[in-house]
Structures are given as C-alpha cells and as structure tokens.
C-alpha cells in the first residue's frame, strides 16, 4: 500500500515537473515527420497480460514492424531527435503515466516485449509476479545496452546471451529483497547515474554486496569485466536463438 501511494504521488509530481522537457521534445519529434511523437509499445504486464507502455518516439514510424526487438546505438531506425532522447533517457519520463495508471511501478524489473518474455525459463517467469518498473538494478547497470549491442550482427541474439541472463538475475534478486528502503536507494542511484555513471555503478555494487548478492552479481554490477555469454536463470544451457 505504501509503495503504491508513493508511486502515485511521485508520478503526479514527476509528470508536472518533467512537462517542461517532455512537451518541447515531443514537438521536436513531431516536426521531424509529422507523425505522433508518442509510441505505445506493447509490453508484458504483471501476471502475463499486456499493456501499452508510453514512450517518446525515438525511432522512425513503424520501426517495430521490422522484426528486431533489441536496439544497438547505431541502429539506422533511430531518428536524429531519437538519439538525443535515448542519450538522456527522456523516453522513460512519459512512463510515469503508466505508473499513475497502475500498470507500472517506479521501481521494478523492466517490462519486456512478448517475444522476449516467451523465452523466459520457469525461474525467470517470477519476474512477471510484480509490477514492471521504470528503474531497477539492471536499468542502471545496463544503461549502455545500446552500446553493448552496437556492432553485433544479431542484436537480439546478443541481448539474450550477454544481457538478459544478468538482467534477469538482478531482477530476481530485487524481487527477493524488495522493500521501501531499497526502492528509495535505487531511485536515488538512478538520479546519481545521470551525473556520474561510475559512481552509480559503485553504489549498485555496494548495495548488492550489503544485501548478500552472489559475488558474480556484485562484480558484474561494476561493469569492469567483459560480458560473455551466460545461461539464463533456471537453465543449464546458453540460449542460442530466439525460438
């Protein structure tokens, strides 16, 4: 109850404050091609249903029809204004509407497209037992997801081998340890990440360590080591394709 009340109040205040950034950015997106500046992206909701996540559109119209879900930093579908939006994560500000409507929370595992959620192992499906969030451990640790996938010939395959296993582990660890204090810490760290990514990563790693996370998870949070293919939680084999 406290979490939901905090979500509602913060979302209302956040929408009011962020409007000074969102409105002119939306106008800039519209002026590019005279199409809607917003994209309602289908995402998997708590319980396995679907909802439409509100985002400032950063890609060309109908980019979601190309069959590629993961996006590298050099993806040709990203528009000029879209690169600015993605650089500063402005598309996440409009997701406060989803928080207000109860489809998302401020803190929780990031919502996934159905094709990714369909690949979940039984263990990963625990991620669908809570409201998806705007930020969490993985949002901070993998804020550079586009750069990781930048030169990959198959971004979807690289995502499932390099990023998804760790994002899922971080999300599951959050679920097992979530409380109001942890949510506040993650919100503060998300703000810190805007100013200093290195400081934010150290905060995440330290927080994971204090909460008793496995050493491998604590280390990957620092992002000092090269990412290598890993099996997803609940699986003993590396996912080699999008089945």
Image: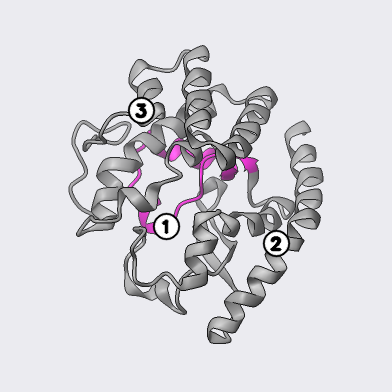
Q: Which residue is mark 1?
A: 114
24 within the magenta span: no
Q: Residue at x 47, y 30 (%)?
A: 201
Q: Earlier in the sequence, mark 3 or mark 2?
A: 2
Q: Residue at x 52, y 40 (%)?
A: 109
Q: Residues within 10 Å of mark 2 (few under 14, many from 20)?
A: few
As drawn, the label of residue 21 is: 2
Q: Earlier in the sequence, mark 2 or mark 1?
A: 2
Foreground: disc 3 or disc 2:
2
Q: Quadrant of the C terminus?
A: bottom left
Q: Which residue is mark 3?
A: 220
* Discs 1, 3 touching: Cβ within 8 Å: no
Please say if 168 is above or below 132.
above
119 within the magenta span: yes
Q: Which residues are magenta?
A: 106-134
Q: How many marks?
A: 3
Circle 2 — which element? helix
Circle 3 — which element? helix
Q: Residues within 10 Å of mark 3 (few under 14, many from 20)?
A: some
Please say if 24 is above or below 145.
below
Distance from Cα at disc 3 to Cα at disc 2:
33 Å
Q: Residue at x 34, y 42 (%)?
A: 164
Task: Residue 216: tell me if it is visible.
Answer: yes
Foreground: disc 2 or disc 1:
2
Distance from Cα at disc 2 to Cα at disc 1:
30 Å
Please say if 212 is above or below 78.
above
Q: Give the percent coordinates (x, y) of residue 208.
A: 49, 20
Task: Residue 118: tell me if it is visible.
Answer: no
Relative to 80, is 108 on the left or the right?
right
Circle 1 — which element? helix
């Amino acid at each position: 109850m406290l979490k939901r009340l905090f979500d509602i109040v913060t979302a209302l205040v956040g929408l009011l404050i962020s409007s000074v950034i969102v409105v002119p950015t939306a106008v800039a997106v519209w002026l590019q091609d005279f199409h809607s500046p917003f994209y309602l992206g289908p995402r998997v909701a708590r319980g396995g249903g679907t909802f439409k996540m509100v985002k400032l559109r950063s890609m060309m119209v109908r980019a979601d029809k190309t069959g590629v879900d993961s996006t590298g930093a050099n993806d040709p579908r990203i528009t000029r204004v879209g690169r600015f939006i993605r650089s500063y994560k402005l598309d996440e500000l409009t997701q406060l509407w989803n928080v207000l409507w109860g489809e998302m929370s401020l803190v929780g595992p990031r919502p996934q497209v159905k094709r990714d959620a369909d690949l979940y192992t039984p263990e990963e499906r625990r991620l669908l037992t809570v409201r998806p969030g705007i930020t969490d451990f993985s949002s901070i640790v993998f804020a550079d997801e586009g750069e990781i996938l930048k030169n990959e010939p198959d971004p979807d395959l690289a995502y499932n081998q390099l990023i998804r296993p760790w994002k899922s582990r971080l999300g599951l660890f959050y679920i097992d340890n979530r409380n109001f204090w942890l949510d506040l810490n993650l919100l503060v760290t998300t703000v810190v990440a805007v100013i200093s990514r290195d400081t934010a990563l150290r905060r995440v790693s330290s927080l994971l360590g204090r909460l008793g996370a496995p050493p491998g998870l604590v280390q990957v949070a620092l992002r000092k080591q090269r990412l290598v293919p890993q099996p997803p939680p609940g699986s003993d084999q590396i996912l080699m394709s999008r089945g």
